[in-house]
Image (cartoon, rainbow, N blue to C red):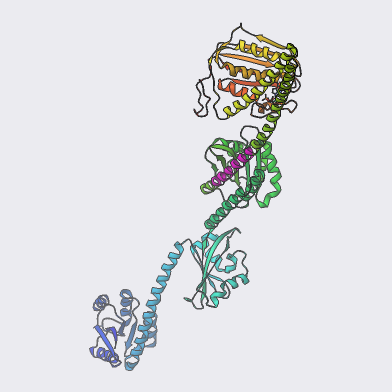
Amino acid sequence: MTALRILLVEDSSDDATLIIRQFERDAYSIDWVRVEEEPDLRSALSAQPWDVIIADHALPHLDSLGALAIAHEIAPGIPVVIVSGVIGEETAVAAMRAGASDYVMKSNLRRLVAVVEREVREAAERRQRLRAEAALAELGRVIDESEDELYVFELQTLRIVHVSRAATAHLGLTADALATRTILDVFNGMTLDELTTRVRPLHLREVEQVVFEHEHRRADGSTYPVETRVHVSHVREPPVFVAVAREIGERKRHERERELLSDVSATLAASIDWDETLSTLAHFITRSFASWCVITIRSGEGAERFTTVGVGPDRVAHEPTLREAFAAASCPAIDRACRRAPAELVTRVTPAWLDASFAHSGQRAIATTLGVESAIVVPLRARDRVLGAMLLVCSTPERRFDARSASLAEDLGQRAAMFVDNARLYREAQTAIRARDEFVAMAAHDLRTPLSALSLAVQSLGRMIRRHAPREQIEALVAVVERSTARVTRLADDLLDVTRLGVGRLSLDLQLVDLTEIVRDVANESATLPGAPRIVLEVDAGEEVVGRWDRKRVEQLLTNLLSNAIKYGAGKPVEIFVTSDSETATVRVRDHGIGISPESQQKIFRRFERATTERAGLGLGLYIAHEIARLLSGRIEVESAIGEGSTFTVTLPRGGPRPSRIPPERAAVVH
Ligand code: ADP
């Protein structure tokens, strides 16, 4: 039994009974109320929900139009069916216009049930539709809140019929403008064939949705990467495609960064040839991260500077100019990074920054040509030493460097620095191995000469003793033996000293000693050397220059300087000057020999370094002299010009070594 709630607006209870009976006859269970006047109608409408209102057309106090108005006011949506004994066509039309659902003549009440059934059903459908529309509007609001773009487009024509707020916002187009386009206008570069292939599984009902990555094209022609999910929706007739696209710029960026780091790591791990590897690094950086870049490696002590550059694929023609400009002069931005610990991130480059960063006009010019919108300058730091710096530049205003780019750049910088450090250590190790081999060869050679002399002298001595040769001849040979032994001993001592200096264990025996006396002894000793020139000694400020020094070590230092002056002095006189004040003593050894070039002057105090191959030598004398001066808190300097001779100046504090700041294990042992 179907239940029906009927509100009757009827003055005749007989008629009401008649009407209800029509329904009960059709097996309806009726819940009904009859009202005649406006207040009753109002309270009945408010009291409970009704499925239908059946109103008599003409009541004494309320006509059907009045009843309609009240029903629409209090309970809109409830169908109102008018019944009437007589009704003119005009009245009927007016009633229908006013919103009546239908009218039925009392003489034909049998029709009423069918009319009411239809109206109740349609009202229910209307309500359902309204609810669905409200739900849809709600859903639309939710979709509009999302950052995902939603496109509804037709299956056949691909015409866009609906878009979400994110779609219009991201594309920079209004919904109306999009309504005149097809989805292929949004999918950058996708052909109809491609799209057809992609959505074919949907047509074949093989899958519920298809997912693909591609690009969307904005109104201004620029593009951005998206991941799109497409399905067929049957909520509309005919069905439509619904595409939900999510911007994946960030994800793509992540992927690109990971790729860059792994490419860079692989490149850096594959080689120890830094020039080539750093160029490859610059190339990788400009392929995916920066528009152009400059990498500068400063060498430790010398003036050597290595610069490589990278330029994005679209502007490689500028690479030589860029390299030239940055190899020609140092760049203040890079110099700054070498002094500062953290990376410098400039999200928006200003003219002031350009002024402070590219002092050289060529650098400024090429930077302007290539474009500088944002920049990162990263120091290359390894084992607490700054080895150089990288300048990375982004020349597109829409894609500026941010804090994340800076941290990626720092990561790259760290890897590059570690690589450079390793490559440098490897190079140094190679050089050291070569130097050691050369040294061993030379040491062997240097030992051989006095040893051969010694061996010859000893053999002759034996013969002479057996022959009872004259005493003078024997004494002359003994002198040769003594000199050769002294030379071998000195060589052995030098080697030992170098080893001790290397591990910081050269000992000092400090006493109050007179420098003038030492200089005089050394000069006299040297004067006896074969082929020694005239040695002129000038002592300033009286006789004694007393200081707290190690006599043997000072003697060794001066002997090394003087023997060099004789060895490289071209046989010309050698002068020695001693001067002093209350604090320091100075010894100057001057020769007029072959001289030393400015480049060699930088190196000759280092171990095994030689500026000439003219005379035999191990390249140790000046190193030892320099180290002895340093241990005594003094210094040695050289002034020289090729062909004009050299002057070595030793300055020693008279108070002896100052308390050292060198860690104990590296310091010399002082007795
Ligand atoms: P060695 O003399 O055994 O080669 P040193 O350490 O004493 O080693 O000197 C290093 C180098 O410095 C020498 O090989 C030589 O080239 C250069 N040198 C040193 N003293 C002089 C000098 N007085 N005149 C010219 N060259 C010198």
Where on the picture, by quarter, is residue 436? top right
Q: Is residue 347 visible?
A: no
Relative side of 466 to 659, left or right: right
> Is the stretch drawn in magenta largely helix, strand or loop?
helix
Relative side of 659 to 466, left or right: left
Where on the picture, by quarter, is residue 630? top right
For the residue pair 6 and 503, the one nearer the viewer reads as: 503
For the residue pair 136 and 213, the one nearer the viewer reads as: 213
Relative side of 590 to 20, left or right: right
Q: Position of residue 190 (x, y in %)?
A: 61, 67
Q: Position of residue 283 (x, y in %)?
A: 64, 49
Q: Is residue 583 above or below residue 114?
A: above
Image quadrant in which the N terminus is located? bottom left
Q: Position of residue 458 (x, y in %)?
A: 71, 21
Q: Is residue 417 magenta?
A: yes
For the residue pair 203 and 115, the one nearer the viewer reads as: 203
For the residue pair 161 and 655, the one nearer the viewer reads as: 655
Q: Is residue 439 above or below residue 165?
A: above
**Which residue shows up at 55% across the image and 44% down it?**
414
Relative side of 545 to 571, left or right: left
Q: Is residue 385 visible?
A: yes
Where on the picture, by quarter, is residue 519? top right
State ligand 1's quadrant.
top right
Q: Is residue 44 magenta?
A: no
The span shown in magenta is: 409-429
